[in-house]
Image (cartoon, helix red, strand yellow):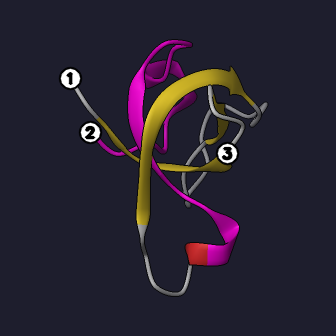
Amino acid sequence: MSGTFRNQINIGSRVKVVQKKDQRTGILTEGVVSRILTKSATHPHGIKVMLQNGIVGRVKEIED
């Protein structure tokens, strides 16, 4: 699943995010969501989250 819809992401979800510094290369970082930072229901580039290790990025993939 892509990470453009806020209602598909829960705290504790395992996701892959792209960090701001990696947007050009598209390198994904895997982790577990600790906070959902985007307030709107959708975002075309992915919902912004904070992972448990403190990394902030936009969700590109939600792992089942």
List the single residue furthest toward the left.
Answer: 64
Amino acid of disc 2? Met
Q: Residues within 10 Å of mark 3 (few under 14, many from 20)?
A: some
Q: Tell me the element at label 1.
A: loop
Q: Over which residues does the magenta segment extend?
A: 1-21
Q: Tell me the element at label 2.
A: loop
Q: Which of marks 2 and 3 is nearer the N terminus?
A: 2
Q: Which of marks 1 and 2 is nearer the N terminus?
A: 2
**Residue lying at 48% horizontally and 45% vertically, measured from the top left:** 4
Check disc 3 and report the residue beneath it.
Answer: 55
Amino acid of disc 1? Asp
**Residue lying at 46% horizontally and 85% vertically, measured from the top left:** 25
Q: How crowded is mark 2: few (under 14 residues within 10 Å), some or many (20 or more)?
A: few
In the image, which disc is placed on residue 64? 1
Q: Position of residue 56 (x, y in %)?
A: 70, 47
**43 shown above or below 45:** above
Q: Tell me the element at label 3.
A: loop
Magenta stretch contains residue 63: no
Check disc 2 and report the residue beneath it.
Answer: 1
Label 2 to label 3: alpha-carbon separation: 20 Å
Q: Where is residue 44 in the image (x, y as percent from the top left)?
A: 55, 58
- Quarter of the image with the C terminus is top left
Which tag is nearer the camera, tag 1 or tag 3? Answer: 3
